[in-house]
Image (cartoon, rainbow, N blue to C red):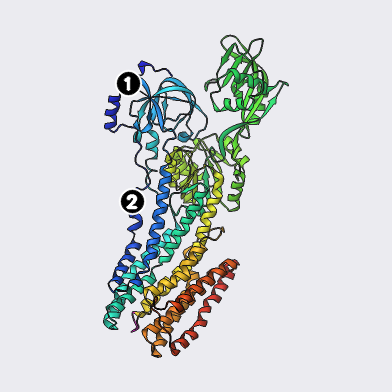
Amino acid sequence: MKIDPKWSSLSSAEAARLAAEGKANVSPSSASKSVKQIWFSNLFTFYNMLNLVLAVLVATTGSYRNMLFLGIVISNFFIGTIQELKAKKVVDSLSVLTAPTARAVRDGKEVVLPCRELVLGDVIIVGAGDQITADAVVIAGEARFNESLITGESDPVLKTVGENLFSGSFVISGECAVRLTAVGADSYAERLTAEAKKLKTAKSVLKTTMVRIIKAVTAVIVPMGMLTFLSHYFVQDLGYAESMISTVASMVGMIPDGLYLLTSMSFAVGVVRLAQRRTLTQQLYSLESLARADVLCLDKTGTITSGKMRVRETVSLTGEDVAAIAANLYRVLPVDNATAKTVAEAFGGKGDEGAAAVHTLPFSSAQKYAAADFGGGKCYMLGAPEFVLGKKFPRELETAAGFAKDGTRVLALCAAKFDGKLYEAENPLGFILIEDEIRPNVMETFEYFKKNDVAIKVISGDSPAAVSAIAKKAGVPGAENFVDASVLSDGELAAAAESAAVFGRVSPEQKRVIIKALQSGGHAVAMTGDGVNDVLALKDADCSVAMASGAQAAAHAAQLVLLDSDFSAMPEVVKEGRRVINNIQRAASLFLMKTMYSFALAATLLFLPLAYPFAPIQFTLIGAVASGIPGVVLALEPNFKRVPKQFMSTVLKRAAAGAVTIFAGIMFSVAAGGSLGLTLDEISTVCTVFTGISSLVTLLCSCLPLNKFKGALIAFCAAVFFVAVRLLPGVFMLVPLGKAAALLLAAMLPFTLIQYFIRRNQLRKEEN
């Protein structure tokens, strides 16, 4: 476009002054954490600080091997930190706007500048394929824009001189000069997404449960540790080192440290697997949120449809070749919108390549048709049936309406006459039927959600009838139940949220109304979106999924980002979440069992003149072979069953049998050992071996029903435990057992199987 001096473009000096005043097109800081924040948030947690204090206390005794439990703390820290850093790197690479540069007019000349260097009042020139980088007003020329990322409506909009533009709009056709009226944080898109840019934490039953556990442990672990130390040091007169080691062992035993590591590793593995499928997970617990969702809200364009159109068929009313005539029309008319491009590409090889027109009338949004006069009586009109046919051809207009009922776009072709000023239809020749291209595999995706009792809600800015028709084709259950949100109050819309499956003409604020209404009904709601108009609802949803091809504001607001913008990837994301949750639930009983019997043991020994029978390093050995190693391995196993709603009650029920068995066995060993005159080291060895074997039996129970893989895992863990006991007794503070101690251990071993029979009975009940 030729630069007009009347545009009053800025000079370089003026632009520099405006940039210094903070009026540059710089987006507010990213919603993602800084690198420093990520390191600090993973390092300075209560869990880490508690274990660090315990390690310092052990260090004061000089028994450094008993500090081995810090390995779990360090592993947990690095897993969480590395995952978050990787997520930050990928999400920050998603450009706020797909156009990194713009053609600006500075000092009366056209220059190419990075979008962030544009300032308020700058004049930029945009053409087909460009994206508006800030709010603006058209000052010269005209162009058609796709504003779907802002309004949710996919139909192109013609913008002429004096009309406003919003950042995020794409130029479909034409060329114009625009002056920036709002930049950076002041633009419409940034104002709308300001709330969404605040950090959003994924809702997680697992995380909530862990917080409750750590709060409960915190409430008792410090006072109980102090009382244990006082009892050992002053009452039993065991000395500082022995009293401190026993105290720390009792406190370490009550902390379900392995569960934190297992959870972090399980989700981290899930994140890596999804990354390989081009899905970015911005928070570890996002997988759980989607796996628990029972309602999925989504848009039409970009989710059900690809955003492209195709000619389905042509219908001739007179025997004329509709395709050939359409091809001739678009040889002489500008192909300046998506519909024209679709027709031109479909019929490019037909018609008369030498066709020439004596007059043409390009399509405009006002007249809704295009026309051309080729001379010799060959004059044609092509466009929207109600504008081409009008009331002059009611029968053909009714035929077109019938084609449009299923969401098909209908173009009417008529022979016409041209009087030098106006075109008028004389004879309907036929129709061109165009439909939105439905994404491949989308029907299989909806079928998957249907089988898994996940309701689908299609929320769009387009016509409700058209969206309903497309949703039917894609296999959305209940797609015939649709409402027009533009004529409903918030209360009426909330009431329709449960029953309707399709919502048309929905504003960004109304999307939030629908989400909140579903949540009020007890549903866990997931939502997919790609535009600025989606971000408020994405933030409110229990789980939010964005398409990378859309606005970056949506990617910031979402917990998951589909980097290939492929909705068919959703079932794999759900499966990965289910695998993680189900495996954690199965293995959690192994860790919470230790917390349960350790708490009961520490509390009981406060009232008895008996020493705590464990050292921290012994708990490290037991935890490694009975929960740490198997927990990590089992977390990788496929397990795609539906996620149960009750997490804590199920885990505690499974852990209780093992905890009671181990607690009773330890108390009997301590009491009997004292009566038999065993040394404290012998009692500790008996308790360690008994607890290790009982914990392996608990592992066996958690693996029911068995298969070869699980059987091999149990055998490996048992072998590691017995090798450690036999070959490395000094490392784990174990001593050779005398005859009395050996007989006591042998007598106790049959009791370890009690929990096996209890768990097998529980499994039968769960299956029934």
Q: Which residue is the site of mark 1?
A: 107
Q: Position of residue 267 (x, y in %)?
A: 47, 56
Q: Is residue 72 above or below residue 38?
A: below
The x, y position of residue 354, in whole percent, is: 64, 15
Vertical comparison of 219 with 437: above or below = below
Q: Earlier in the sequence, mark 1 or mark 2?
A: 2
Quarter of the figure that contains the N terminus: top left
Relative to 746, is 343 above or below?
above
Q: Amino acid at mark 2?
A: Gln
Is 608 covered by the magenta stretch?
yes
Kindly indicate the quadrant of the structure image that contains residue 394: top right
Where is residue 266 drawn, in percent x and y? Answer: 47, 59
In the image, residue 510 sits, relative to residue 612, either above or below, namely: above
Q: Which residue is mark 2?
A: 37
Q: Are marks 1 and 2 in contact (CB under 8 Å)?
A: no
For residue 285, say whether it is visible: yes
Quadrant containing the C terminus in the rendered view? bottom right
| Span shown in magenta | 606-610
Q: Considering the numbered disc 1 on the image, is that residue within a helix, a strand or a loop? A: loop
Q: In the figure, is residue 2 to the left or right of 419?
A: left
* Amino acid residing under circle 1: Asp
